[in-house]
Amino acid sequence: MTAFRPLLPHEVPEEWRPHIDFERQEIRLMSNKPRSFVSVTCPKCNKQRLARADVLRRRQYRTIYCNSCTASAEVQKHHVRGVLAPNWKNGRDDNHKYPRIHIALLTPEEQQLFASMIIKGKSYISEHRLVMARHLGRPLRPNEIVHHVNGITHDNRLENLRLVKRGQHCRTHTQTLAEIARLHKHIEEQDRHIESLEKRIAELQ
C-alpha cells in the first residue's frame, strides 16, 4: 500500500480550513486503490462526512460542500471559472504535452473568432494553434495541424511552427522517425569503428 499522505492546511483555501478536521484522516480502498480521506463539515448544513484529500487539493469550491448542498444557488455562486476562480493560475496550463491558454486572456473579438478552436468541455485553446490562428487572422480548420519544427511542443514561437494538413503531418513524423533511426545506426557504426581503432592503437603501443 502506498504511503499515507495527509492533507495539510496550506493545500486548501484559507476559508475552508475551519471546516476541515485535519486531525481526523484515514486511508480507505477505492477500486482496490488506497485513497486518503479527511473529515469535513459542510459550511451550509454542518453535515459531517469523509472527503477525498486529493479532490480537496484541487480547490474546486463545490468539493467542500455535501452532495445535498452542492446544487444550491448559494454554493453555485462560488463555483466560478476564469480569473475569479480560487485556483486561477494566470490563465496558462502547462500540465499537458501542448500548453493551453484560457479564453479569459483573449479579447472578446478573439473569443468569438476562435470559438471553434476551444477544447471540447474546457475553456482553453492549445497555445500553438492560437499562435498560428492569430498569425493567419482566422480560426484553424480541424484538418489543419500545427507542427513544431524542432520537436519541442512547449516552444510556440511562430518561427518554430508550420501549418500542415493532417496527412502531411503524419508523413513528416514518419520521415523524422526514420531519419532518427538512420542517425542512431550511423552513430553505432561510428562507435564500433572508434572502438576498433582504439584496439589497433593499443596493439601498436
Image (cartoon, helix red, strand yellow):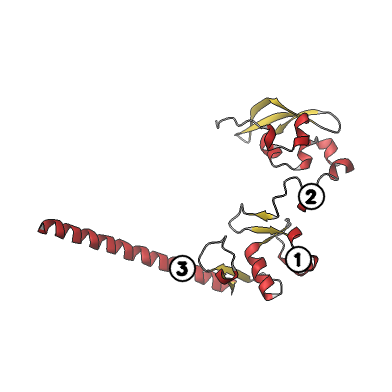
- Separation (CA) of disc 3 from disc 2: 43 Å
Q: Residues within 10 Å of mark 1 (few under 14, many from 20)?
A: some
Q: Is residue 81 visible?
A: no
- Which residue is located at x 81 percent, y 37 percent? 67
Q: Is residue 31 above or below residue 136?
A: above
Q: Residues within 10 Å of mark 2 (few under 14, many from 20)?
A: few
- Which residue is located at x 69 percent, y 39 percent? 55
- Separation (CA) of disc 1 from disc 2: 21 Å
Q: Which mark is on residue 115?
A: 1
Tell me the SS state at disc 1: helix
The amino acid type of the residue labelled 3 equals Thr
Image quadrant holding the C terminus, namely bottom left
Comparing labels 3 and 2, the label whose residue is closer to the camera? 2
- Which residue is located at x 85 percent, y 41 percent? 75
- Asked if the residue under mark 2 is in contact with the one under mark 3, i.e. CB atoms within 8 Å, the reply is no
Query: Of label 3 and label 2, which has the lower sequence position?
Result: 2
- Asked if the residue under mark 1 is in contact with the one under mark 3, i.e. CB atoms within 8 Å, the reply is no
Comparing labels 1 and 2, the label whose residue is closer to the camera? 2
Quadrant of res 191: bottom left
Image spot of residue 145 (x, y percent): 61, 69
Query: Of label 1 and label 2, which has the lower sequence position?
Result: 2
Q: Which mark is on residue 176?
A: 3
- Separation (CA) of disc 3 from disc 1: 33 Å
Which residue is under mark 2?
A: 84
The amino acid type of the residue labelled 2 equals Leu
The amino acid type of the residue labelled 1 equals Ala
Residue 119 lies left or right of residue 159; in this view the side is: right
Q: Residue furthest top?
A: 23
Image spot of residue 22 (x, y percent): 70, 27
Q: Residue furthest right?
A: 73
Q: Is residue 186 visible?
A: yes
